[in-house]
Amino acid sequence: MLSIVGLGPGAASGRTLEAQRALEEAQVIGGYTPYVEPLRAELPDREFFSTGMRGETERCRRALQLSREGKAVALCCSGDAQVYGMASLVLELATGQDDVRIIPGVTAALSAAALLGAPLSGDFAVISLSDLLTPWEKIERRLHGAGAGDFPVALYNPASRTRTDRLSRACGILLSYRSPETPCGIVRCIAREGQRQEILPLEALAVRQLDMLTTVVIGSSETVEKDGRLLTPRGYRL
Ligand code: SAH
């Protein structure tokens, strides 16, 4: 049995009970090195394997191989197991004989939004600014779509060491649809050491340098800041 487990944003308290059970039932626990290493102390008698960034295919093949050998395997992803996670890649590599189950987790967009208030209260878009697997032109088209549709947007992978202009380009696109005053939020290291958050207008966000450990929320035309929190009203008459 291979369980693809979404661990939530960071702390063990943010895991679902189902995710916790899958970890406890596993004989082998695998995943991206920084996510798996902290689990060693918690579950010291398990077998572990991990791969670094860009080791995703190898990680999934290994997990499938171990489960074919009869082991109970938990392949861990941060947040949710589907959202820029390993679930789809495992299903691409699996055969009909493989016993695979996918255990959802709280994705970073929702954890970030909850810390900021309630900005993602209706329809919203999640867009990763990583162009490793998606051409940048397509990412720009999606940003235009979210802008035209007036979706609040959660951005993942707002920058990398090599591409530092992604966020300013994304904000530039959304600024062609939205006011420079549009309230936005930045949350770094959710449920991890050094967690911090900030609310700022879109024009200020556009000139920020962020890193990969950060999730960005950009309001729609309806999003407001109230008492230090972001919220997008759902339209109830008050
Ligand atoms: N499967 C993950 C997303 C992986 S993509 C999920 O569902 O949450 C990686 C991106 O997610 C990061 O670049 C960042 O934008 C966001 N992210 C993941 N964990 C985070 C955390 N603890 N704090 C802030 N952002 C996080």
Image: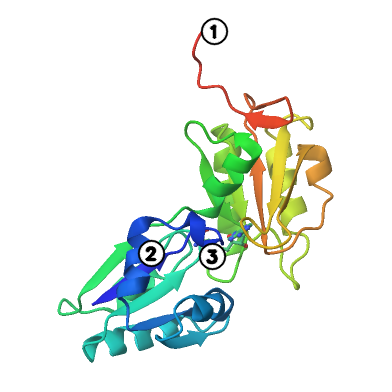
Q: Name the residue: 26% across, 78% down.
A: 94
- Residue at label 3? 134
Q: Which residue is at 73% across, 54% downward?
A: 167
Mark 3, other Cα within 10 Å: few <14 / some 14–19 / many ≥20: few
Classify mark 2 as within 8 Å of ligand 1 or not, answering yes or no.
no
- Which residue is situated farthest in the left direction here? 97
Looking at the rendered structure, the kind of residue marked 2 is Gln
Disc 3 residue: CB within 8 Å of ligand 1: no
The kind of residue tagged 1 is: Leu
Q: Is residue 166 above or below residue 96?
A: above
Give the labeled residue for mark 1: 238
Disc 2 is placed on an element classified as helix
Q: Earlier in the sequence, mark 2 or mark 1?
A: 2
- Of helix, strand and loop, which one carries label 3? loop
Query: Above or below — where is 150 with respect to 88?
Result: above
| SS under mark 1 | loop
Provide the residue designation for mark 2: 20
Residue pictured at 68% horizontal, 64% vertical: 212
Q: Position of residue 142 (x, y in %)?
A: 55, 48
Q: Earlier in the sequence, mark 1 or mark 3?
A: 3
- Closer to the camera, 51 or 37? 37
